[in-house]
Image: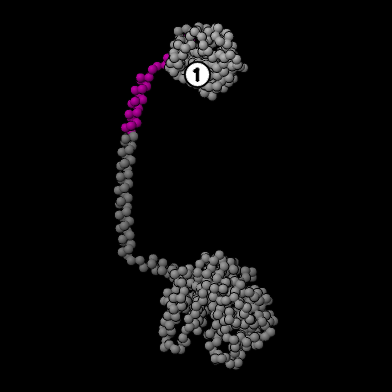
Amino acid sequence: MKTILADGLYAAFDLGAHSAKAALIDRRGGKDRLAAVEQEPLKPVSEFPGEAEYREHQVQQLKVLSERLPMGEIRECVAVLNSRELQVKLVEPPAQVQPDKIEGVLQWEAKKLLSPTYRNEPFLHAWRMIRESPPVAALAVIPQSVLQRHSDLYEAAGIRLAGAYAEVFGAMGLKAGSVSLGLPSLSLINLGHAGTHLQIFAAGELKFYRFIPTGLSEFSTPPLPGEMDGFSQKIRFSFDYFRAVSKLGHIDELLFLGGGATSPEYFAFARDYFAPGKIDTLDVSKSVDISPILPEMAAPSGPGPRHVKLLPFLPALGAFWAHADPQGPSTNLQGRLNEKAWQARMSKLSVAMPLWIGLVGSVVLLVALLFWRLSLADQVEQVRQKASIAANTLTTLQVKVARLNKARVPEIRLASRDQAALQEFLRDHRTADEILFLIERQRPEGVSVSRLQIQTKAQAEEEIQEEEPTSGPAGGQDALAPGSEGGEPAPVPMPTLGGTPDQDAEMVEELGGEVLVIHGRASGYQALSTFAERLVQARVMRRVRVVRLLPKAAGESRFLLKGDLP
């Protein structure tokens, strides 16, 4: 079955006329395991002077039963609802009724099922759709006062019920979990001590339900053949009525459950009485793991050792499966009672609220408003002060701007000659990427660059002054004069931008920025001179300050080239 319950422990109770029973189910990953079963006998009601004393006896037996269960670990408790005032009927609403209107139709049908004693009292009803088209529903109705007494009995024993289900809804859960399919017709018979519930399924659907107010309490010990025959006739009358209205010729299979199904005398009698139909006990071991409580053994058909222990607890197990069914909320009479009680408490609380609570609330609200007003006043004052400070700051800035505008130097217009002299100084300097690109582009064959530096003018001047004592014409590999080793020609003249710079150009040079230093290798003076001239023409250097070649006997010679950046 599809589950809507979370994993955990669940307890299902069945308070009958002969005993109180409980089944502990452990649900893990949508699979159920029967963790424990407990049973506590009940004395006959005839042994008590009144109903109140018998009810107290039921409460005490439920307490004893619950003490043997781990109530602190149980997520929810459910129970089978047993009452003669519980009425059940299969209802066929008109086919033209909309699905959202079916509940209203069923509520009207439920009121008609109440006994005359409770006809004018509040009631609760539950239903489950058996078929959508044409619509068929199983309807159960019970007076609210009767259900409340049932709930209070469990509450007195310390058991908080989350669900209470009619026998018919539990039988549907047992049918879904049984091994037998029962096609085309199957009957589930719950033999109780004081009553018998009979359900007939055909083609997998519930077709008939009847409660027979007699059970094994009418049998002697051991049962007499006449007693068993009279009881079986009541069951056969129900079968005959069903065959008459449904046109089915025979009930193929009868499955017994409940405490009465443990009687070997009646089970043997029923096999002969209801022949040729197949008679057996209900087996749900394929849908629930019973290994924790029952040994794995091959049991013969009939109430063998395994069935004798498990059959009395099957109605409680059916109530749990009804609780786990997707339609569980609509079949849960206890859930409807809890919801109605909560609504009544909320309504009573809203109507019966004392006047002084309203006054206290008004005073609290008034005090809160006063504090809120004071807080708003403080916030307004702070904002006003900030606005005043901002206005003063703005006025000060405006005065400063006015003074700066008055003291601003007027626009200077330069002559063409002055603009030409300052052009090189005012033009944008090249970026490092542009310098690298132009150096590589202007480099002739025979020249390779190994290192680039950009120095300040002061650093370049210091290096030149330090190098002058070692760069004279005395000779050596650093000399640039003719006749040095290697036989290199005399130094070539320094490339410039054009003619001799005048005084304005010299002023521009003095205002110049940084110095570009290039280290590398050249095949000779001619290649190095060409490289320096191209750099000046491409405006990578404004002028060349130092050209030094360190000749070698053969191959390329190292060189040093310094020039001012534009």
Q: Give the residue at x 55% y 91%.
A: 220
Question: Would you say residue 395 sits in the magenta stretch?
Answer: yes
Residue 341 in which image quadrant: bottom left
Q: Main secondary structure of the magenta part?
A: helix
- In the displayed structure, would residue 317 be above or below residue 358? below
* 24 inside magenta stretch: no
| Residue 223 locus on image (x, y percent) | 57, 91
Residue 46 shows in the view: yes
Answer above or below: position of 189 versus 476. below
Count of all numbered marks drawn on residues in the image: 1
Specify the segment rendered in magenta.
391-417
Up-down relation of residue 191 to residue 136 (above or below): below
Task: Choose between 523 and 35: the one closer to the eye.
Answer: 523
As shown in the figure, which amino acid type bears the numbered disc 1?
Answer: Leu
Q: Position of residue 296 (x, y in %)?
A: 59, 75
Q: Residue at x 51, y 9 (%)?
A: 475
Q: Residue at x 46, y 72 (%)?
A: 70
**23 left or right of 246?**
left
